[in-house]
Image (cartoon, rainbow, N blue to C red):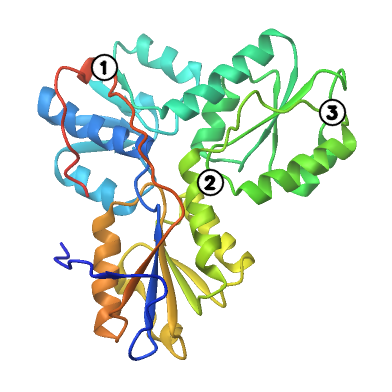
Amino acid sequence: MASRTLGLMSAASPAPNGKRVLLAKPRGYCAGVDRAVVTVEKALEKYGAPVYVRKEIVHNKHVVETLRERGVIFVDETSEVPEGALVVFSAHGVSPAVHAEAAERNLRTIDATCPLVTKVHKEVNRFARDDYDILLIGHEGHEEVEGTSGEAPDHVQLVDTPEDVDKVTVRDPSKVVWLSQTTLSVDETMERVNQLKERFPELADPPSDDICYATSNRQVAVKAMAAECDLVLVVGSRNSSNSKRLVEVALQAGAKDAHLIDYAREVDEEWLKGAETIGVTSGASVPDVLVLELLDHLAEFGWEDVQEVTTANEKISFALPRELRDEKVRSGVR
């Protein structure tokens, strides 16, 4: 674990050697991820190993590997969990069919679905009851999309690419609403919404913003610093939708180069050549220890001055699932 103590400079401070790091804030763990990771740790403490988790609890390699070492068994499907065992559903949410299968197998379940994903599930059910066609903007194959679509499969159509917009068919153009995966790029989502509204002028907006506050906040922080950066390094895993979006947002906002890495050791020295200002951020499922390790790594190459760029202060937290609320546990994967 990195032991660096950040001596953060003001954003106006010049770096003596011309090299500086702009460190985005907010970055890293969001409230939903923190809740999901603590849920698994608390389940281990309360029930003992093994604890089964359907899919990755959050999309981060380090978190998954650390929990696996502590006795968590990750499975792709509920059918792989021994009958009667304990299974935790990941932060991305699951469909009613998955809950039903777990009940049929007499599994003990703890649902670590992010409350913001649950909100979208409830919106799907509400609009399905009112017999709307629901256009879900999201990435095909993503676990959150599968869970959300599964709430009302007869009413939901996935819209991923511009080509998908042309394929949409609706029964009544006056009863169509769009919803979205919570971890998308805000700009990309609105681009797709505008395309849909060209086809369906009466398309209704969701009752509240579906894109997660943390996803949006991290994108705003990257935009605030990207134009000054020769290179932006985003700490996050390749199956993390919101982490991949940060790379795209950085490039769109003016960064000369941007890369996604899981660990500091993945930094290619070729990326550093000719760079003075390096931006650093991390996806919403990334523990800050990985960012600290990256800052230590960059310091070895002369980027010792770290200037924090703050665009929001997050104070949101979510209660643990009711099965685990008897005491608070702080996450050990930090």
Is label 2 or label 1 in front? Answer: 2
Residue at 49%, 36% in the rendered image: 143
Up the image or down, 145 lies above or below 322; here it is below
Q: Secondary structure at mark 3?
A: loop
Q: Mark 3 belongs to which amino acid? A: Thr
Up the image or down, 321 lies above or below 333; here it is above
Q: Position of residue 322 (x, y in %)?
A: 27, 15
Q: Nearer the viewer, residue 56 or 5?
A: 5
Using the image, tell me which numbered label, if any, was put on residue 83: 1
Is label 2 or label 3 in front? Answer: 2
Judge left or right: residue 49 versus residue 134.
left
Q: Pointer 2: what residue?
A: 216
Judge left or right: residue 29 versus residue 327.
right
Asked if the residue at tag 1 contacts the one at tag 2, i.e. Cβ–Cβ closer than 8 Å, the answer is no
Mark pair 2, 3: CA separation: 30 Å
Q: Position of residue 191 (x, y in %)?
A: 74, 48
Q: Pointer 3: what residue?
A: 169
Q: Nearer the viewer, residue 237 or 197?
A: 197
Q: Position of residue 45 (x, y in %)?
A: 11, 29
Mark pair 2, 1: CA separation: 40 Å
Residue at 29%, 20% in the rendered image: 321
Is label 3 or label 1 in front? Answer: 3
Residue at 60%, 49% in the rendered image: 185
Q: Mark 2 belongs to which amino acid? A: Ser
Q: Nearer the viewer, residue 172 or 56?
A: 172
Q: Mark 1 belongs to which amino acid? A: Glu
Q: Secondary structure at mark 1?
A: loop
Mark pair 3, 1: CA separation: 41 Å
Tally of numbered discs: 3
* Mark 3 neighbour class, 10 Å CA radius: few under 14, some 14 to 19, many 20 or more: few
Up the image or down, 146 lies above or below 184; here it is above
* Mark 2 neighbour class, 10 Å CA radius: few under 14, some 14 to 19, many 20 or more: some
